[in-house]
Image (cartoon, rainbow, N blue to C red):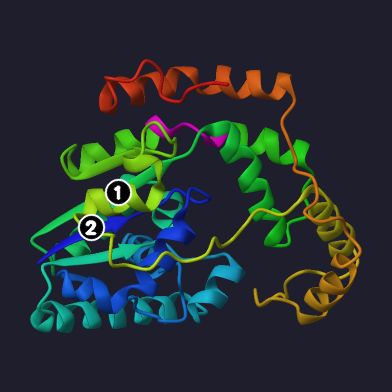
Amino acid sequence: MKALIHIGTPKSGTTSIQAFLRRNQEKLRTQGFRCEPFDPGNLAQMELATVGVIRAGGTVKEANKRHALGVGDHASQEAYVDRYEAMLREGARNWPEHTYLASGEQVHSWLSSPERITALDTFLHQFFDEVRYLVYYRPQEEFMVSTYSERIKRGELVTFEEHFEQRLKKMNYWRKAQMWTKIVGKDRFIPRLMARDALAGGDLLDDFCTIAGIDREPLATPPRMNLSLSAEEMALYLKLGRIVPARKRSGAPNRIFDSLFRIAQRRLPKPGSKISLTDAQRQQIRKACAGSNEKLRAAFFPDRADLFTQS
């Protein structure tokens, strides 16, 4: 049995891919694809990234992630990975399909060292003859804005200017791609670009199906999910979050915050405005990413004049 693991990046259509796989689980089996999340209630399949962290000797520290996983200390996280391993071992013996599909965007962000990538790859090769890793890279200018929305949703009280300075140092796609290829080989690491002129059919799900070998025609398309907040909603999150935290210390969502936000949200304009970069910020991003983007283009997309078409 083979495996195709979609590893992110965050805010690059990952929720759409995960919803597509979940919605079409049964029909995908008729085509020979097995989508079997360890926790049916966890759309993001964080079990994949957790394997790499734990088996490399680390610990998942973020309270909201521990809450989503249903784990606490290191021992409980080890037990979680052991249960996932047992599920895959049993599945590999009994699943009749030819390919295991999984999608977990935390893989790209959490597995930030060779040791963690190696740990996940070694783990998966216990059950699958071939393991390929698929990643989607979004233009950094779009990524900057969308990741800010995600941080605000998590309850972080950070201004866009603070986010910009922090994220600017973390958008070198080439560094992570180079790390993956050194460990798993260029033939098993599949980078794709979140750009209409680079996606098969100009569509993310079409592209994913093309890479996987899925016939999309009989499959259902899920509605758009995990949409970015409007600028007005972000401002409300920040204002309210300074009074009532969006999450409890355990990492669980704070229902009081959620209720107050929904009430106040009714007064906001619809659909609202969007945060946008200044010309100076765009130039900063392009300058910071120019060298690494060119290396990624030359290595994986030699037919493109530029990695991302600039408007």
The reply, left or right, for residue 148 in relation to residue 76 is right
Residue 242 found in image quarter: bottom right
Pointer 1: what residue?
134
Q: Quadrant of residue 89?
A: bottom left
Query: On residue 167, which mark appears?
Result: none
Marks 1 and 2 close (CB-CB < 8 Å): yes
Image coords of residue 310 (percent x, y): 53, 21
Task: Please state which amino acid type lies under the numbered disc 1.
Answer: Leu
| Relative vertical location of residue 132 with respect to residue 247 in this rendering, above or below | above
Q: Nearer the viewer, residue 122 or 269?
A: 269
Q: Residue at x 69, y 76 (%)?
A: 253
**Horizontal side, residue 290 vs residue 240: left or right:** left
- The residue at 50%/77% (across/down) is 73
Tell me the crowding category of disc 2: few under 14, some 14 to 19, or many 20 or more residues within 10 angstroms, Cα based.
Answer: many
Quick check: 194 above or below 127? above
Q: Which residues are magenta?
A: 169-174
Q: Residue at (50%, 51%) from the top-left corner?
A: 10
Report the number of discs: 2
Q: Which mark is residue 4?
A: 2
Quadrant location of residue 157? bottom right
Q: Amino acid at mark 2?
A: Leu
Q: Secondary structure at mark 1?
A: strand
Q: Position of residue 178 (x, y in %)?
A: 30, 33
| 229 with respect to 17 (left or right) | right
